[in-house]
Image (cartoon, coloured by chain):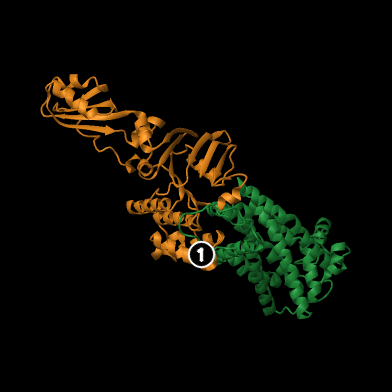
Chain colours: A green, B orange
Amino acid sequence: MTITTPPAGPPRIRQPRPHRLRTKVRDVGVMTRRNIVHIRREPLQLSDVTIQPALFTLLFVYILGAGVVLPSGGTYVDFAIAGMLAMNLVTSSMGTAVGLSTDLNTGVIDRFRTLPMWRPAVLVGRSVTDLLTSFVCAAIVAVTALAIGWRPDAGIGQVLGGFAVMLLFGYALSWGCGCLGLVSKGPESAQGVGLVILFPAAIVSNAFVPTQHMPTVMRVFANWNPISAVTSACRQLWGSPNPSAAVQTWPMQHALASSLLWSIALLAVFAPLAVHLFRRRTEN
Amino acid sequence: MIEVEGLTKHFGATVALAGVDFEVPRGAILGLLGPNGAGKTTALRIITTLTMPDAGRARVAGFDVVRDAAAVRRNIGVAAQDATLDETLTGRQNLVMVARLSGLTRGGARARAAELLEQFELVDATDRVLKQYSGGMRRRLDVAASLVARPPVLFFDEPTTGLDPTSRARVWEIIRGLVGEGATVLLTTQYLDEADELADRIVVVNHGRVIADGTSAELKAQTGEARLEVTLSAPHPEATVALAPFVLGDIQVSHDGRRLRGRVRSDDGLATTVVRALDGARVTVDDVIVHRASLDDVFFALTGQARSGADETAGDPTTGDDLP
């Protein structure tokens, strides 16, 4: 039950009430709205999901595409878009680390902590916001790709399925980034550490070039890299050129299954860890 | 309504609280007074569930701040010292957010926000983002945010620091109004006149310990001293002799020999006794003033240190005249 307005007159002592699902959803909604107001006021903080995806997609397709010859045939643009989507979603998941770290380092967190709200809403609201911005990011990659000649060779259901696989992975990864934001000292260090981990991980994968000609160590890493798994799954669903299909490792042979397993595993590890870290960080 | 027992807190090697006890009955205002770094804010943070105590316990509205923190949060409103509102949101958005998170419906939250913005004279700034608020406006919005759910227990950490006299009087009036409705208030302050003006009881902390606890009058009586100032019709050699039995320490005499001053014990009927003694020595008196100890004197005597920003408080108007 929610109260419409607080009762006037002598204030009475209120008994504790457990948080029901409805109040949890409400608090997550309030936090999400707050984050969206922030974005509306400073739209440039969204550049990593608006300008960057368009720019990177154009740059990579025209620069790398000029030199890469695919062993499986097909055009580079059809091959590359899944990788572009993966890279942009992976790097934008860092927004969660930055956003959470910013929240924890301002006085407003103390206000939240004295309110009878469901506290993890700060965390969940952040991840919901990041999921929404991921949709923007994916849409911009798609529009840019279509403009430069990307034509998926699959039905609409499969195309959307490819996006869903990617967005799920990005969402799962944002919980990992959330953990990073929760243990880092400030937004700058969260961003710095996130970039050092995620950018190489995105490069050493099948996202930009086929893995076949990479040096051994890189190749092994790339073929087991979850980013390769989601990219490969997406290419499969879109009917895009997918040289990784020829790679004899379990994740590359079962791209869809392994990408879903990775997403579930990341969520299973990082979501509870983030809640734990958040509680620890805000309880003392 | 608020019970604090043996509260202890260390930050590394620094002792913030070394065993603090006090109690605030329902419907009372307690002023927590002390110099910077005395432990006021730490005590407040523990009682409002923001910080865990190392030892001791605190109860608010009957709920333990550690074990029943969630229940405590349903009963408190807090205006902390540093801005705890969202800089990027407008005044209205901030209040609506706090109201929603306190359990009000969407419509209820909007209505309550509008009501508070009016009460705190922030209507003109309703849709401005906080970044554009002045310090005083932020302070008022912070206090307003603590009242959103009309909680029975309120905590204000230096509620009028940085406010102009008008806003200050306004905040005082609002706090009194809340207590009039039955709320219980704990406020920290550096301003002695604020404590004097608002608080039913004052707890003075220093170095993490309670060094005095009582009403303003009790604390003033505790030092037991007053200042006596006598103005004679004409200088008289017997005057100092007649006053000597009452005065502790030296008697100060002005250039023209007409004004005499000294510290005295704050006994009943002091002025009468002084006039009789002077009359007995055939000294004619124009004026006798007994200055009871101000809270400033008490504070100084208790903490043994001058406060920062002493000019803010009602100073003693008689100091700094023609006496040597």
Dividing the picture into quadrants, the one containing residue B269 is top left
- Residue at 40% x, 63% y is B118
Dividing the picture into quadrants, the one containing residue B311 is top left
Q: Looking at this view, is B170 or B311 the one in front?
A: B170
Spot occupied by residue A276 in the image (x, y as percentages of width and height): 68, 51
As drawn, A233 above or below B254: below
Spot occupied by residue A186 in the image (x, y as percentages of width and height): 59, 51
Q: Is residue A101 left or right of residue B42?
A: right
- Residue at 20% x, 22% y is B243
Spot occupied by residue B320 in the image (x, y as percentages of width and height): 24, 34
* Mark 1 surroundings within 10 Å by alpha-carbon count, few (fewer than 14), some (14 through 19), many (20 or more): many
Three-letter code for the amino acid on which mark 1 is drawn: Ala
Dividing the picture into quadrants, the one containing residue B324 is top left
Q: How many marks?
A: 1
Tag 1 subunit: B
Does residue B88 appear in this view?
no
Does residue A108 appear in this view?
yes
As drawn, B86 above or below B260: below
Residue that numbered label 1 is attached to: B109
Spot occupied by residue B70 in the image (x, y as percentages of width and height): 60, 51
